Image: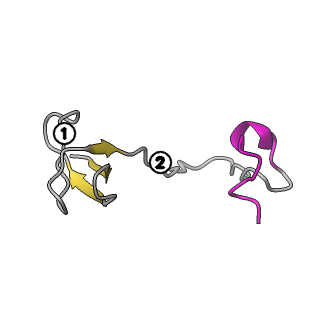
Amino acid sequence: MPIFEYHCGKCGNKFEELVQGDRNRTIPCPQCGSSDTEKLMSAIGGISMGGSQSTPCGSSGCASPASCCSSGSCPHAG
């Protein structure tokens, strides 16, 4: 059962919910009870299964910083 992150349009609360069954149903805000909630996009962590190491975008070995950092500021640059 997946855990989704939601944002309440009424009070601004961000919360997580374990969703069983219909993943598209409206989830009410636990803080104010409003049904004006929206499912947020979450970052997906990468899982390495071995093999070659990929170089983070923005580093000196990055093959294509423009394709993975379209905003112009690379989150991997340090």
Q: Amino acid at mark 1?
A: Thr
The answer to whether residue 64 is left or right of residue 15 is right
Q: Amino acid at mark 2?
A: Ile
Residue pushed farthest bottom? 78
Residue at 29% x, 58% y is 11
Q: Which of the labelled discs sits on residue 35, or is there none? A: none
Residue at 43% x, 44% y is 41
Magenta range is 62-78
Residue at 24% x, 44% y is 36
Residue 67 lies in quadrant: top right
The answer to whether residue 37 is left or right of residue 51 is left
Residue at 48% x, 49% y is 43
Residue depth check, mark 1 versus mark 2: number of the one nearer the observer: 1
Are circles 1 and 2 on residues that touch, CB within 8 Å? no
Q: Earlier in the sequence, mark 1 or mark 2?
A: 1
Comparing 48 with 62, the one in front is 62
The answer to whether residue 37 is left or right of residue 49 is left
Q: Residue 34: percent from the left, percent from the top? A: 18, 50
Q: Residue 26: percent from the left, percent from the top? A: 18, 39
SS majority, magenta: loop
The total number of labels drawn is 2
> What crowding class fits label 1: few (fewer than 14 Cα within 10 Å), some (14-19), or many (20 or more)?
few
Q: Which of the labelled discs sits on residue 44, or is there none? A: 2
- The figure's colour scheme reads secondary structure
SS assignment at label 2 = loop
* Residue highlighted by disc 1: 26
SS assignment at label 1 = loop
Does the magenta segment cover residue 66?
A: yes
The C terminus lies in quadrant: bottom right
